[in-house]
Image (cartoon, rainbow, N blue to C red):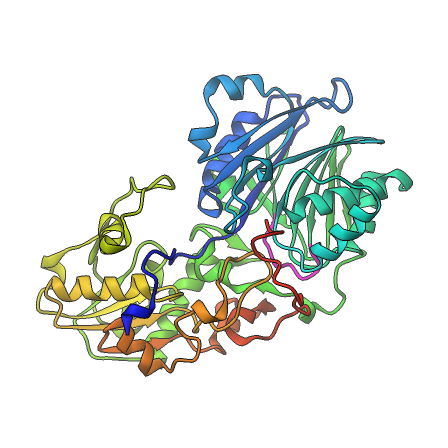
Amino acid sequence: MNNEWDFNLEEELHEECGVFGMYDFDGCDVSSTIYYGLFALQHRGQESCGIAVSETEGPKGKVNAHKGMGLCNEVFTPEILENLRGNIGVGHVRYSTAGSSTRENAQPLVLNYLKGTLAMAHNGNLVNAPELRRELEYNGAIFQTTIDSEVIAYHIARERVKAATVEAAVANAMKKIQGAYSLVIMSPRKMIGVRDPYGFKPLCIGKRDNAYILVSESCALDTIGAEFVRDVRPGEIVTITKEGIVSDTSLCPEDKSKEARCIFEYIYFARPDSVFDGVSVYHSRVWAGRALALDSPVEADLVVGVPESGNAAALGYSLQSGIPYGTAFVKNSYVGRTFIKPKQSNRESSVRIKLNVLREAVMGRRVIMIDDSIVRGTTSALIVNMLREAGAKEVHVRISSPPFLHPCYFGTDIPNEEQLIAHNRTIEEIRKVLGADSLSYLKLERLNEMAEGLPICNACFSGNYPIEPPKEDIRGEHSE
């Protein structure tokens, strides 16, 4: 049965990107701080990155930018950062879906237009990007990229021609775009943060000395020694100037049940030391493990997590069940983005190079293996087999999310339904494919508890999309 799976397919899911903006009112350079902030967000995007900066007291509209393919430490050198002088700036780390991994699509986008200059970083996906793009093209727009972020930038620029302020132009553009977006926008004298009315993607405000920060995850604030101020509300436009912070909540949903945070931020994407909308990611993952132990108990000798995102859930399972928590895997920290995958005939070694099993820990033991999700099943099957080869007596797999059944249109590269192992398979059939002694997933109804009652989007598990999904597959061609 394993033969039907292409062992060259990427098993891990990817978040689309992370954004970071900073405005220092004292006039200090921000590029090096943005760099370290992006470093803390590297898990959100590992294919390209960029920084754009400007002087608020300098020539209006002069933006200095650098971006490229690769990790932060590959794209930026001390010399490059030294030349990026400015006291206001935006940064971006990106992961693209197949077919759009090019330098042209790297961000931030810098746009020169009638009213001046904008630099913008975007996290998310628009569901109506193709229609908006075609409309702009019919009106003479020439696109430099294949990402929907450029569609957003164009609409803001068009609205700015007739609006009194940049933030008013952003509000008008928000009435046209549909989907998931957290934006950080730099204009010559302002920094603007925007979160879509559903709140799909996270965005928060931080402060350090006399500087304000807008960033995807709160963990990046800790990295640069900044204090967390608050989250940007779903639908809110935050404008930061020397006069302070101005908030426009006119597009925030009156009915909070209409909000739809991506539950996969809590399950997998975010770093465990981040907090979104008052909910600790680490606490959510530990709680998911506890729920698995309550709903899917099994007799065993050891609970282990598949690093890194399975570890907190494994701890939760152990705490709830009383079964000892242990380490079964040693992870090679030096396998990065540029890792050259072996040929198909030697697919196993790509997993073995990343992970190795501690034989002493699992030999002769009944092992509960906790992971955050199963996509195609190839990696999970190989890890189960590695545990057995190391002498595990039994391998019981527990997954701290429900089965993936549907694609995502809001910024997660979940493949088509036909490529998902749970598509048209029972739990028992999946168990056989994995070669596990037992298999259980987190129950769908547990997800709301995992987010402590916050309204969430769980469409990839349930098929209940908060926005009507596009009739054409937008993923890959117009994505960010």
- Examine the structure image and report whether residue 307 is included in the region drawn in magenta: no
Residue at (52, 36) in percent of width and height: 49
Query: Residue 228 versus residue 83: which sits nearer the camera?
Result: 83
In the visual, does 263 lie left or right of 373?
Answer: right
In the visual, does 294 lie left or right of 201?
Answer: left
Against 25, residue 273 (above or below) is: below
- Examine the structure image and report whether residue 198 is included in the region drawn in magenta: yes
- Residue 144 in percent (x, y) is at 67, 37
Instruction: Give the magenta-colored segment's residue range.
Output: 196-203
- Residue 341 in percent (x, y) is at 31, 47
- Residue 264 in percent (x, y) is at 49, 62
Query: Residue 243 versus residue 402: which sits nearer the camera?
Result: 402
Which SS does the magenta portion mostly show?
loop
Q: Which picture quadrant has residue 292?
A: bottom left
Q: Which picture quadrant has residue 10?
A: bottom left
Against 302, residue 37 (above or below) is: above
Against 333, residue 383 (above or below) is: below
